[in-house]
């Protein structure tokens, strides 16, 4: 696997967003400002609640296949490589990691088998689209922590995906979960969400390195980022953390992450979180407390690192 100099683009985009000229300009600026070579395109769909077995991947608000294909074509026209990433959110606001069912089927209760059937329809549809558009990588899941233990279902689903998509396949596990998955051998690339506190990178990389050595697979952080607010460098995964704006906190976090990872040759890249499809005005950057990067000092840090990385 080549080094991933990536960025996630357009998370939570709705139908029509990717056909808007503003989103095309945003994608171009992302490449220009951060020297990005890979764009991760998340297809975001929902299920009603954590125990729902129906994934509403054909809902009216979901981006259409046509606009996904058009944005992939535009990204490739810019010279970008594309990683397609179907994602499930829970409509009631529960984090997707808490999607969960009984380990053993119980009559009249929702079941893992029903959920995986719905998820499989969703995933296989986009696996076929990824093949048709020649995406460089396909992500079969993201941060589905409670589902991670369902090894047989994941192996079966990945086998189905391979019948439709011939490129590299990864699963984006959540932070601290890299050494808990038992089916890394089923994918081509190990990836995780690298939202680790500023001071703990070395410790966490030591732990992840053991997994990479054991599995003998390429590894990259499919997500990694930090909000620009006071205290977020110590808890970068908490998007609900309240605090005043601090562009310095975000910058220091990226500097610490890159410094630690640069010493580990097995870390083969990043999918930085994240770049918005619709950008705020540049003069508003200093007031933004989100993970967004446009116009913030972290932009230059990312660009410098990507330019210096082979």
Image: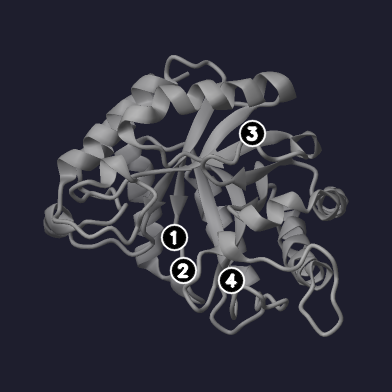
Which SS class for mark 2?
loop
SS label for mark 1: loop
For the residues labelled 2 and 4, the Cα–Cα distance comes to 10 Å
The residue beneath circle 3 is 179
Asked if residue 71 lies left or right of residue 281, the reply is right
Q: From what the image shows, is residue 49 above or below residue 6?
A: below
Above or below, 89 against 215 in this view is below
Q: CA distance from mark 3 to mark 4?
A: 28 Å
From the viewer's perspective, is the residue at label 2 or at label 4 nearer? 4
Name the spot of residue 280 as percent of width and height, x first: 23, 62
Q: Nearer the viewer, mark 3 or mark 4?
A: 3
* Nearest to N terminus: mark 3 or mark 4: 4
Q: Nearer the viewer, residue 20 or 95?
A: 95
**Which residue is drawn at the image coordinates 74% and 56% (left, top)?**
127
Q: Kindly identify which residue carries mark 4.
A: 45
In the rendered structure, the answer to whether residue 85 lies left or right of residue 13 reads: right
First of labels 4, 1 by sequence position: 1
The disc label shown at residue 13, or none: 2
Instruction: Give residue 180's mark.
Output: none
Give the x, y percent position of residue 257: 36, 29
Label 3 close to label 4 by CB (< 8 Å): no
Please name the residue that numbered disc 1 is placed on: 10
Q: CA distance from mark 3 to mark 2?
A: 32 Å
Q: Position of residue 84 (x, y in %)?
A: 61, 52
Front tag of 1 and 3: 3
Q: Are marks 1 and 3 in contact (CB under 8 Å)?
A: no
Q: Is residue 5 visible?
A: no
Q: CA distance from mark 4 to mark 1?
A: 13 Å
The residue located at (74%, 66%) in the rendering is: 119
Sequence-wise first label, 1 or 3: 1
């Amino acid at each position: 696997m080549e080094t991933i100099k990536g960025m996630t683009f357009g998370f939570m985009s709705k139908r029509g967003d990717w056909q808007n000229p503003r989103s095309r300009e945003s994608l171009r600026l992302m490449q220009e400002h951060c020297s990005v070579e890979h764009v991760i395109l998340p297809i975001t769909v929902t299920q009603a609640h954590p125990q729902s077995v129906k994934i509403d991947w054909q809902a009216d608000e979901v981006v259409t296949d046509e606009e996904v294909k058009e944005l992939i074509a535009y990204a490739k026209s810019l010279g970008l490589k594309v990683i397609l990433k179907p994602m499930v959110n829970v409509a009631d606001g529960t984090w997707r990691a808490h999607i969960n069912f009984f380990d053993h089927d119980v009559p009249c209760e929702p079941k893992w088998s029903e959920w995986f059937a719905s998820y499989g329809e969703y995933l296989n549809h986009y696996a076929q689209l990824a093949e048709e558009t020649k995406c460089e990588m396909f992500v079969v899941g993201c941060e589905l922590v409670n589902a991670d233990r369902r090894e047989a279902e994941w192996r079966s689903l990945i086998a189905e995906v391979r019948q439709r998509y011939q490129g590299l396949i990864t699963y984006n596990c959540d932070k601290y979960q890299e050494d808990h998955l038992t089916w890394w051998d089923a994918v081509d690339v190990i990836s995780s969400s690298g939202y680790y506190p500023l001071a703990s990178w070395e410790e966490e990389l030591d732990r992840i390195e053991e997994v990479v050595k054991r599995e003998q697979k390429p590894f990259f952080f499919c997500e990694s980022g930090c909000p620009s607010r006071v205290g977020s460098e110590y808890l970068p995964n908490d998007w609900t953390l309240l605090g005043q704006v601090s562009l310095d906190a975000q910058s220091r976090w990226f500097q610490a992450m890159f410094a630690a990872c640069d010493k580990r040759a097995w870390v083969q890249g990043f999918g930085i979180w994240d770049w918005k499809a619709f950008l705020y005005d540049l003069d508003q950057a200093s007031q933004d407390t989100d993970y967004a990067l446009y116009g913030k000092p972290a932009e230059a840090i990312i660009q410098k690192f990507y330019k210096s990385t082979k």
